Amino acid sequence: MKLSKATDYALHTMFHLIKKESAKPIGVQQLAEYQDVSPTYLSKILTKLVKAGMIESISGAQGGYKLKRNKNDISFLDIIHAIEGTTPLFECDFHHHEGCLIQSEIKNAEEKMNEHLRETKLIDLVKKEQRLS
Amino acid sequence: MKLSKATDYALHTMFHLIKKESAKPIGVQQLAEYQDVSPTYLSKILTKLVKAGMIESISGAQGGYKLKRNKNDISFLDIIHAIEGTTPLFECDFHHHEGCLIQSEIKNAEEKMNEHLRETKLIDLVKKEQRLS
DNA sequence: TTAATCATGGACTTACAATGTCTATGATAT
DNA sequence: ATATCATAGACATTGTAAGTCCATGATTAA
Ligand code: SF4
Ligand code: SF4
C-alpha cells in the first residue's frame, strides 16, 4: 500500500522537465544527479514514460529526454499508472462469484482517489510554486 | 500499490464474524479452513484486529474469536488501517521543504479514497447480499 | 486434577518483487 | 572516427510479505 520509489523518481523528473522545458533534451546524467540515483536505473524508469508517450528520448551526443505530450495535460495519475501499472488495489484469488461487492466497493474507493489524481495536473503545482516564490 | 493478502484474510474473516454473529466464539481453525490459509498465520493477522479493539479472543477450549465493537460501525478503512498501518501512500526521502505540494496533493487524493472506505460499513454489504439472495 | 482444546508470540524459513549494478550495443552529433 | 548519449539484458542486492514450527499459557470438560 505504498507508491514505489520509481514513481517518486518519475514524478520529480517530470516536474523537472516541465519547469525547464526547452527544445534541447536533458541528459539522464543530470536528471539522476540531483535525485541521488544511478543514471542507468533512472533510464529504465524513464523508458516507461517514453513508452507511455509522455516524453521522448534522443540518442547520441547531446541527447537526453524532453517532453512529448502537452505539458498542460499531464496528470499525477498518468505518471503513476505508467510506472505502477493499472492493476486494481484489491484482487482476490478465489473469484467465487461475479459482481463481488467487496471488490466493487474497493474499486469505487480507488476510483475516487484516481479522479483526484487525474484532475491534478503537474503544471498547476509548478505555477502554484512559482507564485509562492 | 496493492493491498496485502493479510488484508484480504482479515476482511473475509470480519464478514464471516458479522454474518454468523453469536455469543459463542468461532475458532481460528474453522475461520482458516474456508479461506485456505494456515490457522497460525491467520491468528497472527487476527491479533492485529484484536489490538485494534474490533474483535476479542477467548483462550482455551471452546475459545476463538468474536466481535467486540458494534458490528454496525465497522468500516473497510478500520480493517485496512489495522492491518496495513497508516503510513501515507507517498513519502519522499529528502523532505527538502515543509508544505510540499506533491506530498499534500497525493495525501488529498488518498483522503478521498479513505473517505469512501470509512463510509462503507461491512454491515451494508452483508445486508445488500442478503437482499439479493 | 488431568487431559484435551484453544490462542499467542518468538524465531525461524521461503517466496517474490523492488531496487540497483554492470556491461555490451546501437544511435547520433561533432 | 570518436566521444557522447539512451537502451536492454543479465545479473546481484535488499526488503517485505507470507508462511511454518514450536513452546507457552489459558480455559474447559472429564
Ligand atoms: S467475496 Fe469477493 S473478494 Fe471474497 S472470495 Fe468472493 S469474489 Fe473474492
Ligand atoms: S518536492 Fe516534496 S516530495 Fe519532492 S523532495 Fe521536495 S519535499 Fe520531497
Image (cartoon, coloured by chain):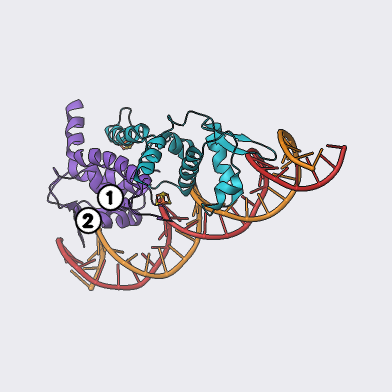
Chain colours: A purple, B cyan, C red, D orange
On whether ligand 2 comes within 8 Å of the CB at mark 1, the answer is no
D30 left or right, relative to A87? right
Q: Where is residue B1 in the image (x, y as percent from the top left)?
A: 37, 47
* Residue depicted at 19% across the width and 39% down the height: A119
Number of on-image labels = 2
Q: What mark, if any, has residue B77 been given in the picture?
A: none
On whether ligand 2 comes within 8 Å of the CB at mark 2, the answer is no
| Marked residue chain, label 2 | A
Viewer-proximal residue among C14 and B73: B73
Q: Quadrant of the C terminus of chain A?
A: top left
Dot 2 lies on which element? loop
Dot 1 lies on which element? helix
Q: Which of marks 1 and 2 is nearer the N terminus?
A: 2
The amino acid type found where label 2 is placed reads: Ala
Q: Quadrant of the N terminus of chain A?
A: top left
* Residue depicted at 19% across the width and 52% down the height: A54
Q: How crowded is mark 2: few (under 14 residues within 10 Å), some or many (20 or more)?
A: some
Check contact, mark 1 vs mark 2: CB within 8 A. yes
Viewer can see residue B91:
no
Q: Position of residue D22 (x, y in %)?
A: 73, 51
Viewer-proximal residue among A91 and C30: A91
Q: What mark, if any, has residue A52 been given in the picture?
A: 2
| Marked residue chain, label 1 | A
Q: How crowded is mark 1: few (under 14 residues within 10 Å), some or many (20 or more)?
A: some
Q: Position of residue B64 (x, y in %)?
A: 61, 39
Query: Which residue was labeled with disc 1?
Result: A81
B26 left or right, relative to A41? right
Q: Where is residue A84 in the image (x, y as percent from the top left)?
A: 32, 51
Viewer can see residue A119:
yes
In the rendered image, which quarter is residue A93 located in?
A: bottom left
Viewer-proximal residue among D3 and B33: B33
CA gap, disc 1 to disc 2?
9 Å
